Image (cartoon, rainbow, N blue to C red):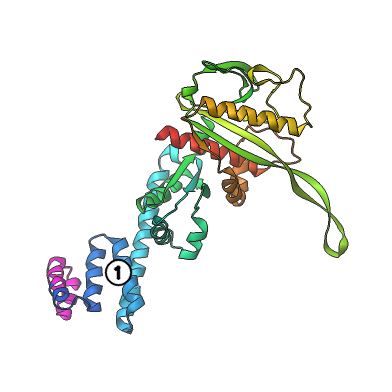
Amino acid sequence: MLDAIAAAFDRQDYQTAAQLVAQLLAQSPQNPWAQFYAGRLQEVSGKLDTAADTYRQLLRATTNQKLAGYLRQGIQRIEAKQRDRRQQAIAQATAEPNNNAPGFLVLEAVTGDDRATVVQNFARVMKLDAYTVRMLLPNRGWRLYRAGVTGELQVYGQELRQAGIPTFWASQPEIEAIQLFRVNSFQAASPKATVVCQNVQDQVGFLSFDWSEVTQRVEGMLPIFEQVLDVGYRNRLERKAETQDYAHFCDLHLPGRRCILRLHDSSYQFDEGVTANAQVAIAPTDRTTIRTNWNQLMALLKRQTPNAETWSQFTPFGETAADFSRPLLRLKPHIYLSRREDSYWDSAFHLYSSLIFLRGAKR
């Protein structure tokens, strides 16, 4: 029967092959050759992932060198087909004008009992070992996974989603299309909010909105670096950058207006508007008072936006963004901190907030 099955495959008579394989499996379900030919049927019917899993399981169990050779050839054929299929999909996606722009792809957190299955699926799709995948796949927050041409990211993202891995991607033009306003102060908080704010051209104006328009709140801390002297090799003094403080930020998302309102603890005018609790301006160096006032402002925002989704896992996302400093620095962060040189942390927060905005808007 094995000779008859092989002959049917040689002449591409898959209907006869399927009938013979079914008969052989009914007679001897544990026969590795019968299972191999069942995998061949999966392969020729286009079920490449299933066939590859069948081949790999048999390869781990078999001691027959001839069968092992056929299994390796099958795995190589499938991987070649999958590469060709992916390249064709990328070529088709990048042929669209909107998909030629740079973009970013993130992995969302996976926890619980599903994590083991997701790790296996991720390893299969991206051709990685399970250990590497476990290190890559976040169990809290998001991880910046890839930066590149949006069309290519779209293909990878769709493959990962089909395998059960939660991902999200967006192009840089989509991010730049979001209006951003830096809030100087709240002039009114009830029943509607009114803020004094600046746009990206530094034009100052007023913006009024209903609190129900705020669907998401994104909070994050950006490190402030200072040059310090440290004792290095052979007791030589060396200058290096160390984190001396953190700047607190909070973004309010108003998707109906396609805009983000950004608050920053050191630029917010606490001595103005409804949150004022002092009659004199706060000194820029008075970090204790600024922190107290900032906490009060955050408590006000939480009271007024009880139904808004809060995102506060920026720090682990920022840590994963270190490998993407070059593409990140091409993204204007609209964050103005006193720094000796640009930091990818600023762009990472803007990216984090913008991706969350776009994800919520698309949903």
Q: Residue at x 30, y 83 (%)?
A: 66
Q: Is residue 7 magenta?
A: yes
Determine the image quadrant of residue 47.
bottom left
Q: Identify the image quadrant of residue 235.
A: bottom right
271 vs 155, nearest the viewer:
271
- Give the residue type that dot 1 points to: Thr
Residue 180 visible in the picture: no
Assess disc 1: are there few (<14), some (14-19) or many (≥20) residues with their C-alpha within 10 Å of its C-alpha: many
Up the image or down, 82 lies above or below 202; here it is: below
**Quadrant where the N terminus lies?**
bottom left
Q: Residue at x 54, y 29 (%)?
A: 302
Image-based side of 6 in relation to 206, left or right: left
Residue 296 picture location, percent across and down:
64, 28
Picture layout, residue 212 above or below residue 70: above
- The magenta span reads 1-22
Q: Residue at x 50, y 27 (%)?
A: 305
- Please give left or right for residue 8 compared with residue 296 in the image: left
Q: Which residue is mark 1?
A: 54
> Residue 257: x and y, percent?
48, 23
